Image: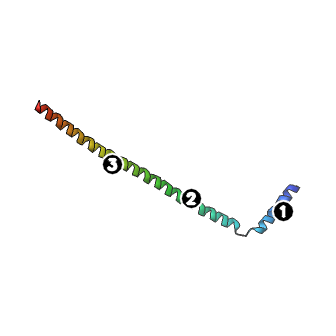
Amino acid sequence: MSDHSRHFLALRKQAAAHLPPDFARRVMRESDRLRRRRAAQTRIIAMTGILCAVLAIAIHAAGVAALDRQNLEMWAKTAAQARALEVSL
């Protein structure tokens, strides 16, 4: 075993003496908790994006429908005026 390997092993033993026995288990548990939390946040972000898109489409569709009604009313008036003009000539 080289000096470098022995030194690394000594450092590793010294570090292990400072860590609690269940350190690895706690790290893995915290990692799982954070992963679940991130997954939940990602789902919330995705649902919010979908909701915003659906709302934007609904608002656009309502605006287009209102504009279509307004245009049809104007064309109906124009057609009525054209018929009245035809009759009067």
Q: Position of residue 52 (x, y in %)?
A: 43, 52
Q: Say which amino acid is labelled 2.
A: Arg
Please determine whether, in this image, residue 4 is positioned above or below residue 69: below
Q: Which mark is residue 38?
A: 2
Q: Does 86 sit left or right of 61 as displayed?
A: left
Screen quadrant of the N terminus: bottom right
Q: Name the front one of labels 3 and 1.
A: 3
Q: Nearer the viewer's eye, disc 2 or disc 1? A: 2
Residue at 25%, 41% (x, y): give it: 72
Residue 69 lies in quadrant: top left
- Name the spot of residue 46 as percent of width and height, x first: 49, 54
The first of marks 3 and 1 along the sequence is: 1
Q: Image point 29% across, 43% down: which residue?
A: 68
Residue appearing at x 37%, y 49% in the figure: 59
Residue linked to disc 3: 62
Element assignment for label 2: helix
Q: Are marks 2 and 1 in contact (CB under 8 Å)?
A: no
Q: Quick one: quadrant of the C terminus? A: top left
Closer to the chain start, of discs 3 and 2, is: 2
Q: Check the image and report above or below for 70 versus 82.
A: below
Q: For mark 1, what is the residue?
A: 10
Q: Is residue 1 visible?
A: no
Side of 62 where 15 appears, left or right? right
Above or below residue 77? Residue 20 is below
Q: Amino acid at mark 3?
A: Ala
Residue 24 visible to an observer of this rendering? yes
- Residue lying at the far right in this picture: please name it: 3
Amino acid at dot 1: Ala
x%, y% of residue 16? 77, 66
